[in-house]
C-alpha cells in the first residue's frame, strides 16, 4: 500500500472501534495512521472493498474522530491486519486528524 500513499503514516497507540456489516469490534490497536487512512490489527479479515465505520480515540485530543472508510488491503500473516482508506472526510474531520498527526509528529502528548 505504501506505493499508493500520498501522506506519511504516524505510529501510534491510539484505539479504534470498527463497525463492518452487522459486527462492531471494539478497542483495537491502530498500527499507524495518516491523512489517507489507517492500518489496524483486526481479528478477522474483511474483504477488500468492504465499507467500515470508524470511531478513533486520539490521545491528547478531546474529541473522538468518527469517519467512514473502505478496506484497501487485508493481510493474513503474521497477524490479521487491515489497511483502511478514509472516505468522504469533511474539512472539520481533516482538520482534527491533521492536528493529531502534527502533535504526534512533533513529539507532543498525542498518543
Image (tube, helix red, strand yellow):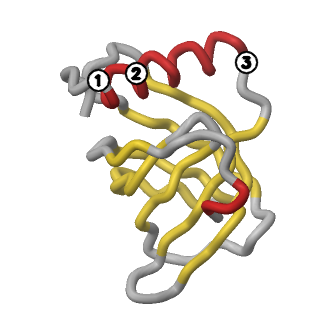
Q: Residue at x 75, y 71 (%)?
A: 48
Label 1 vs 3, first from the N-terminus: 3
**Whether label 1 touches label 2, CB < 8 Å:** yes
Label 2 vs 3, first from the N-terminus: 3
Whole-angstrom CA distance, mark 2 to mark 3, is 18 Å
Name the residue beneath numbered marker 1: 106
Q: Is residue 42 above or below residue 5?
A: below
How packed mark 2 is, by other alpha carbons closer than 10 Å (few <14, some 14-19, many 20 or more), is: some
Name the residue beneath numbered marker 2: 102
Name the residue beneath numbered marker 3: 90
**Whether label 2 touches label 3, CB < 8 Å:** no
Whole-angstrom CA distance, mark 1 to mark 2, is 6 Å
Q: Residue at x 44, y 24 (%)?
A: 64
Identify the mark at residue 7; answer none if there is no mark.
none
Please, what secondary structure does the residue beneath circle 3 have? loop
Q: Residue at x 52, y 42 (%)?
A: 8
Amino acid at each position: 500500500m505504501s506505493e499508493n500513499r500520498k501522506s506519511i503514516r504516524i505510529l501510534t497507540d491510539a484505539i479504534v472501534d470498527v463497525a463492518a456489516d452487522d459486527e462492531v469490534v471494539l478497542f483495537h490497536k491502530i498500527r499507524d495512521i495518516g491523512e489517507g487512512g489507517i492500518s489496524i490489527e483486526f481479528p478477522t479479515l474483511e474483504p477488500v472493498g468492504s465499507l467500515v465505520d470508524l470511531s478513533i480515540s486520539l490521545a491528547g485530543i478531546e474529541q473522538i474522530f468518527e469517519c467512514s472508510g473502505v478496506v484497501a488491503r487485508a493481510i493474513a500473516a503474521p497477524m490479521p491486519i487491515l489497511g483502511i482508506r478514509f472516505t468522504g472526510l469533511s474539512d472539520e474531520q481533516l482538520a482534527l486528524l491533521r492536528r493529531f498527526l502534527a502533535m504526534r509528529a512533533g513529539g507532543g502528548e498525542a498518543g
